[in-house]
Image: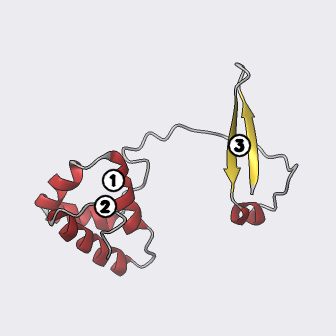
């Protein structure tokens, strides 16, 4: 892992850790110089909403109301559970399962897939 040091004019420093997988992919090592551009994430959930999840919520108004009432962090966690699946068919299955679980009162990403 490599830490990137960023300092501002106010002499405050910030560090960004870069995992070993990314370092290897980019051929970075300690002492490597890189240019980093930071941008403010202005998306609603700081996460791309999978189209399968949008389709499920469009067809299931009860799940949509419950989902929209969750905290931002909880929404992100559930979106991640859908988005991490590679296969579109599996994403649909997972989105449907999550919708059913949140309607049953289970919204914790830690236990929702059990």
SS under mark 2: loop
Q: Which mark is residue 108?
A: 2
Q: Give the image quarter of residue 7.
A: top right
- Disc with the residue nearer the chain's start (3 vs 2): 3
Q: Give the image quarter of residue 62.
A: bottom left
Q: Nearer the viewer, residue 11 or 43?
A: 11
**Which quadrant does the N terminus fall into?**
bottom right
**Relative image position of residue 86 (x, y in whole percent):** 46, 76
Marks 3 and 1, how far apart in space?
29 Å
Residue identified by numbered label 3: 36
Q: Is residue 38 above or below residue 10?
A: below
SS under mark 1: helix
**Relative image position of residue 80 (x, y in whole percent):** 41, 62
Left or right side of 62 for 68: right
Q: Residue at x 72, y 35 (%)?
A: 6
Q: Residues within 10 Å of mark 1 (few under 14, many from 20)?
A: some
Q: How many marks?
A: 3
Q: Is residue 70 above or below residue 111?
A: above
Q: Give the image quarter of residue 101.
A: bottom left
Q: Nearer the viewer, mark 3 or mark 2?
A: 2
Q: Residue at x 15, y 66 (%)?
A: 104
Left or right side of 47 for 40: right
Residue identified by numbered label 1: 74
Q: Nearer the viewer, residue 80 or 43?
A: 80
Marks 3 and 2, how far apart in space?
34 Å
Marks 1 and 2, how far apart in space?
7 Å
- Disc with the residue nearer the chain's start (3 vs 1): 3
């Amino acid at each position: 892992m490599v830490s990137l040091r960023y300092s501002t004019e106010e002499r405050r420093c910030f560090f960004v850790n870069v995992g070993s997988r990314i370092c290897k992919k980019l051929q970075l090592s300690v002492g490597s110089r890189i240019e980093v551009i930071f941008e403010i994430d202005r998306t609603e959930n700081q996460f791309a909403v999978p189209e399968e999840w949008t389709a499920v919520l469009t067809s299931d108004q009860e799940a949509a109301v419950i989902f929209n009432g969750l905290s931002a962090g909880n929404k992100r966690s559930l979106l991640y559970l859908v988005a991490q699946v590679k296969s579109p068919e599996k994403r649909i299955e997972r989105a449907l399962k999550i919708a059913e679980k949140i309607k049953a009162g289970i919204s914790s990403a830690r236990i929702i897939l059990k």
